[in-house]
Amino acid sequence: METDLETSSTWEDPLDEVEQFLSEEQIPFERPSEAEIQFSVTGTWCEYPMWFRWLDGPALLQVGLGIDTRVPENRRSDVADLVVQINERLLVGHFDMWSGDRTLVFRHGQLFEAGQAIREPLIRKMSAAATEAAEYLVPALNFLLWSDKTVSQAVEAAMFDTVGEA
């Protein structure tokens, strides 16, 4: 039975284009395995660990971004509600809170079909989507954890965008 996805033996190294993009942007990176590239990006609020991962089976390129915080156990429910409200507003990707250590991670995947190739514009868009999502979550998380704001107030305050020029 034929499938519309190529098998792993027919894919060139799918992360070569990611590696080339990072090199051109002069972003230091590590390649801990053939299927993953790790690096950091600078945001407004902090440095974010980011990675691209290739999954052969589904022919999926996944971008991930970590948020450097451990959610306090007594705030787990509030942070889970915050993540849900942020996710509702994201056009691409989503945040998860890992159940074991309560870390927050952004993930987004792009499926590929036979003959498709990973190109720089896609890498740039996936990286930007992850960073932009984190730039909304981090201030909302800080408002929630370090002020007396409710989840909804924290989300609204963090996602407020000015329109026009002052």
Image (cartoon, rainbow, N blue to C red):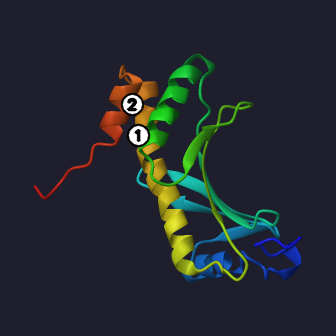
In space, the residues marked 1 and 2 are separated at their CA atoms by: 6 Å
Task: Name, please, the residue furthest toward the front.
Answer: 1
Callout 1: SS: helix
- Specify the amino acid type for callout 2: Phe
Q: Is residue 145 above or below residue 89?
A: above
Instruction: Between residue 107 and residue 140, name the one nearer to us.
Output: 107
> Quick check: can you spot residue 25?
no
Check disc 2 and report its element: helix, strand or loop.
Answer: helix
Q: x%, y% of residue 102?
A: 66, 31
Quadrant of image for the C terminus: bottom left
Does residue 35 appear to the left or right of 75 in the view shown?
right
Give the quarter of the figure containing the N terminus. Answer: bottom right
Image quadrant in which you'd find residue 16? bottom right
* Other residues around mark 2 within 10 Å, as few (<14) / some (14–19) / many (≥20): some
Residue at image position (66%, 81%) is 117
Q: Which residue is mark 1?
A: 139
Is residue 71 visible in the rendered image? The answer is yes
Q: Residues within 10 Å of mark 1 (few under 14, many from 20)?
A: some
In percent of the image, x 57 and y 43: which residue is there?
A: 95
Residue at left 35%, top 40%? 158
Q: Please tell me in which quadrant of the rendered image residue 33 appears.
A: bottom right
The answer to whether 43 appears left or right of 17 in the picture is left
Q: Is residue 68 left or right of residue 53?
A: left
* Disc 1 and disc 2 in contact, CB within 8 angstroms: yes
Q: Say which quarter of the image contains residue 62.
A: bottom right
Of all residues, the one furthest to the left in this rendering is 166
Instruction: Give x and y (percent) for residue 145.
Output: 46, 26
Q: Nearer the viewer, residue 120 or 66?
A: 120
Q: Residue furthest top?
A: 74
Type of the residue with mark 1? Pro
Q: Which residue is mark 2?
A: 143
